[in-house]
Amino acid sequence: MSDHLAGEYDLAIFDLDGVVFLIDEPIPGAAEAVERLRADGTSIAYATNNASRRAADVAALLTGMGVSAEPAEVLTSAGAAAARIAEHVEAGSPVLVVGAEALRAEVRDAGLTPVDSADDAPVAVVQGYGPEVGWKILSEAAIAVRAGATWYATNTDRTLPSPRGPLPGNGSLVAVLRTALDREPDVIVGKPQPALFTTAASRAGAERPLAIGDRLDTDIQGAVGAGMDSLLVLTGVSSPKDLLEAPAERRPKFVAADLSGLFRPAALAVVPAAEVDGWTVTREGDRATLDGSGDPTDALRLLCGLTWDGVKPADVTGTSDAATNLLHTWGL
């Protein structure tokens, strides 16, 4: 039995945005965490819903930040989407691409023909995040889907994390077409679908993979669906309040403030916790109180035991100054 959480697993599958970096800025401690895992013999994979970069570009970006990565370790929703389409249409078929150049390149490499107009009679529309996506290409996509093209979305993340707060993600752009077409995409490829997780584990020959993410609705739900343990880090999108309210299919096995939690004992990251140092909870029917002081993440792990058992987060109050202030910080 290992003395730290990561030592119990043979593969660490990292999400990127909100876990390893925010936009193009590395999150403190990420590079050190990856190198320590490598030194311990743990395999590394990076699985991202962001379809705006190719695997080689992602690896180069990470390396430039001081985070070691090889293209073969990177799985993107763009590459997975292109491969999925190629499985169902004839080689060379026209595919209307809504997204960044990286997505066009993946479509081309999959043996398909990227196009920009519904007049090219595309057999499929593939939609991924791209900062230059605008009304014109979205209109072409709407026309193509109405004409019978199969609509693929690389992912439906509503937001992207950034140092300035959440920004519109591909899910927000998908919502434009959803509104215009009054329907859902035919196929959603990225997380929370299990393909990126299972492919990463298969490539590494892993028997005990751990998924690490910042989003409950993609990273954690995807890991749960793939039958993998997961660690939620609080450096990106999902907040402590989100975790307290999480339904069963979005509950991680572990939670930590950041990636340093990988190197703490697993018992100090498991969620929910029955007891922790410094904090106590008291339940009275459908209400509860938090008392004491200490590590905020420990208080979160303790409270999850109550809120996941029916106490509404809004019905938790603090009896110490530290508890009251912490709950206020979480928006409770």
Image (spheres, rainbow, N blue to C red):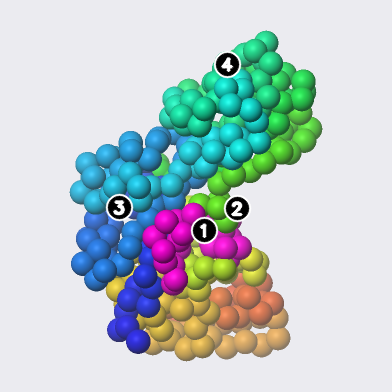
Reading the image, the residue beneath label 4 is 116
Residue placed most toward the observer, 43 or 264: 43
Pointers 2 and 3 in contact (CB under 8 A)?
no
State the extent of the magenta-drawn residues as a range.
Answer: 199-226
Picture coordinates of residue 94, whole percent (x, y): 61, 20
Q: What whole-number distance in Å separates the C-alpha atoms at marks 1 and 4?
A: 32 Å
Q: Are marks 3 and 4 in contact (CB under 8 Å)?
A: no
- Secondary structure under the numbered disc 4 in the rendered image: loop
The amino acid marked with disc number 1 is: Thr
Any part of residue 242 in sight = no
Question: Mark 1 or mark 4: which comes first in sequence?
Answer: 4
Q: Secondary structure at mark 2?
A: loop
Mark 2 or 4, nearer chain start: 4
User: Alpha-carbon distance for marks 2 and 1?
Assistant: 10 Å
Between marks 2 and 4, how big is the CA–CA gap? 27 Å
Residue pictured at 65% horizontal, 31% vertical: 89
Q: Earlier in the sequence, mark 2 or mark 3?
A: 3
Q: Which residue is mark 3?
A: 27
Of badges 1 and 4, nearer the viewer stands 1
Of the numbered discs 3 and 4, the one sitting upstream in the chain is 3
For the N terminus, the quadrant is: bottom left
Residue annotated with mark 2: 193
Seen as rendered, the residue at the extreme top is 119
Give 30 or 287, whichever is nearer the viewer.
30
Residue 123 pos. (x, y %): 68, 24
* Other-residue count near label 2 (Cα within 10 Å), few / some / many at <14 / 14–19 / ≥20: some
Local secondary structure at mark 3: loop
- Identify the residue under disc 1: 198
Residue 14 higher or lower than 296, as above or below: above
